[in-house]
Amino acid sequence: MIKYLVIAIISCFATYLLKDTVSSLEYSAYKAVLAALLNISSIIFAIIGAWIAIIYPRAIGRAFKGKQVTDQTLKDADTDADYLSQLVEIVLVSAIVLMFVLSIEFSVPIVKNLITGNWLAYSKYAAFFLVSLLTLSQLYAVSRVILANYFFLNDLRKKNADGKVDTLHL
């Protein structure tokens, strides 16, 4: 949770630093970013969701295989749970980004006609903050996908080198 608070603070700080530039931006300046966020979030959501659907049954099977619980079984179950929790967090971030982008795409044409006067500048600050927050969150999620899979593959290679992986069942 702290990492997303840091992302929000960075977005807030960027909004403050760029307030003069932000006030001159129109909604059309964000269209390409929102479209990219929608595409990336959809792809990450689908791929990682499918990956979870593959890994989850295997992790449950490994955790409860046999009647005897060993230290290695508990360690494997803990490793699987850590990996799955990372993937679930990534899916949640992508789902939240998807929901916000869809809400923005739907509501902005309506809200543009309702906001006038001094509220226009504040709405532009809020729009920049929200788009930067969503962008940084999605960038963080993509980097987590890369890192999670990198460490997973390193661990798998190490186990394979140690002879702990049964390559016939992979």
Image (cartoon, rainbow, N blue to C red):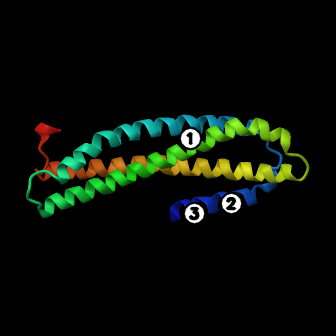
Residue in front for this viewpoint, 164 or 133: 133
Residue drawn at x 44%, y 52% is 89
- In this rendering, would 149 be left or right of 27? left
Q: Which mark is residue 42?
A: none
Residue 109: x, y in percent? 77, 35
- In this rendering, would 44 be left or right of 22? left
Spatial CA distance of label 3 from label 2 is: 10 Å
Q: Amino acid at mark 3?
A: Val
Closer to the N terminus: mark 1 or mark 2?
2
Spatial CA distance of label 1 from label 3 is: 21 Å
Residue 104: x, y in percent? 68, 41
Residue drawn at x 32%, y 40% is 53
SS of the residue under disc 2: helix
SS of the residue under disc 1: helix
Q: Which mark is residue 6?
A: 3
SS of the residue under disc 3: helix
Task: Answer few, some or many: residues within 10 Å of disc 3's Cα (few below 14, many 20 plus, some between 14 and 19).
Answer: few
Residue drawn at x 26%, y 57% is 79
The reply to whether the C-beta atoms of the residues labelled 1 and 3 are less than 8 Å apart is no
- Seen in the picture, residue 48 relative to 123 is either above or below; the reply is above
Residue drawn at x 69%, y 36% is 106
Closer to the N terminus: mark 3 or mark 2?
3
| Quadrant placement of the C terminus | top left
Q: Amino acid at mark 1?
A: Leu
- In this rendering, would 95 be left or right of 170? right
Task: Answer few, some or many: residues within 10 Å of disc 2's Cα (few below 14, many 20 plus, some between 14 and 19).
Answer: some
Q: Amino acid at mark 2?
A: Cys
Kindly identify which residue carries mark 1. Answer: 98
Task: Answer few, some or many: residues within 10 Å of disc 1's Cα (few below 14, many 20 plus, some between 14 and 19).
Answer: many
Kindly identify which residue carries mark 2. Answer: 12
